[in-house]
Image (cartoon, rainbow, N blue to C red):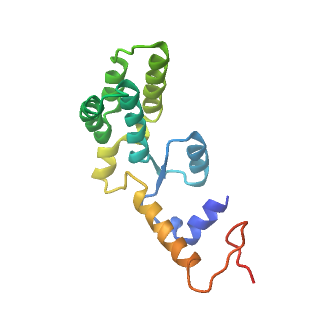
Amino acid sequence: MRIYFEARIRGWNRTVKGVAIGDGSEWIWNSAEPHFPGATQTVDVYHARQHLWDIAWSLHPYDPAGRQRRMDIHKPRLDDGRIEELADLLRATTPTTPALAEFIRSGTGYFERRRVRMRYSGFRNLDLFAGSGVIDAGCRTVAGQHLKQSGMFWAVLGCSRCQ
């Protein structure tokens, strides 16, 4: 509820097109849907890429060139939002162990379950952010400036100002 009130204070009710960006965790979408109905839900592209890198690392743990080749093949599909093609390529991978097979299956499922939230080329065509980096940096800057001003002292438990 706090997030909704904060969003209203900041003008959410006056937006033409709302966007909810998250790392892909289900709780984020379960929270975004009731508070921001109609918002375009987007998995942060950098988090999605990290999942892809994790798969590349698992397939080529001692081969940096192999990891890079795999990313060169898979990343354009992710960045273009062609998640079905990406999932097909991942499923076609031949794992060397049952544990690796399960890891790839799980990673493929991550992309398939979130595919609607990963239509990055479509988001870019609408001039929407696909990543939360700009937002994160803005929050760090604003909070950092506020908390690190000369003469500021803060309690250990948080940002409640000590007297």
User: In the rendered image, which quarter contains the N terminus?
Assistant: bottom right
In the image, residue 10 above or below residue 34: below
Q: Residue at x 36, y 25 (%)?
A: 87
Residue 162: image quadrant is bottom right
Residue nearest the observer in this picture, 23 or 29: 23
Q: Is residue 72 left or right of residue 37?
A: left
Q: Residue 141, percent across and down? A: 47, 71
Q: Residue at x 34, y 28 (%)?
A: 62
Give the number of marks.
Answer: 0
Q: Is residue 59 left or right of residue 41?
A: left
Q: Residue 135, percent across and down? A: 45, 62
Residue 118: image quadrant is top left
Q: Is residue 78 left or right of residue 28?
A: left
In the image, residue 29 above or below residue 151: above
Q: Residue 49, percent across and down? A: 38, 41
Residue sitting at the far bottom? 151
Residue nearest the observer in this picture, 94 or 153: 153
Residue sitting at the far front? 62
User: In the rendered image, which quarter contains the C terminus?
Assistant: bottom right
In the image, residue 38 above or below residue 66: below
Q: Residue at x 34, y 26 (%)?
A: 60
Q: Residue at x 44, y 47 (%)?
A: 42
Residue sitting at the far right? 163
Q: Residue 121, percent across and down? A: 29, 45
